Amino acid sequence: MTPESRRLDGNAAAGRLSDVFVFDATAARTRCGGCGMTAPLGVYHVYADAPGMVVRCPTCEAMVMRIAQTPGHTWLDMSGVAALDIST
């Protein structure tokens, strides 16, 4: 299986992110910490076929976010996000 055949767009993360955020996270403009590309999270690449979900930059493929769920917990690693712009 190739990475491209496993890849989804950032909207695939909407359900898990709605458990954490009260706003539509897929519409939030996200800046990649690797290359600085800024776009709505919905255009980022999501790999969801592992125990957790990995969100990667569509420009440089840097890991931007990791999301994992265990009973009673949601783990969110946003170490690859330089900034998150949330419209109010």
Image: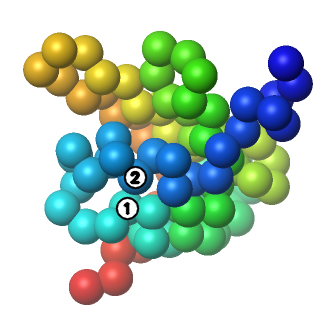
Q: Is residue 80 visible?
A: no
- Residue at the spot of label 1: 25
Task: Find residue 3 and report its image quarter.
Answer: top right
Residue that lies at the very extreme toward the left in this rendered image = 72
Label drawn at residue 14: 2
Q: CA distance from mark 2 to mark 1?
A: 7 Å
Task: Find residue 26 and report its image quarter.
Answer: bottom left
Amino acid type of the residue tagged 2 in the rendering: Ala
Q: Residue 38: give x, y in percent of width and height.
A: 63, 69
Q: Is residue 8 left or right of residue 65?
A: right
| Contact, mark 2 vs mark 1 (Cβ under 8 Å) | yes
**Considering only vertical position in the picture, is 40 above or below 74?**
below
Q: Is residue 25 left or right of residue 81?
A: left
Secondary structure state at the residue bearing disc 2: helix
Q: Is residue 47 left or right of residue 30?
A: right
Q: How is the image coloured?
A: rainbow
Q: Is residue 36 left or right of residue 87?
A: right
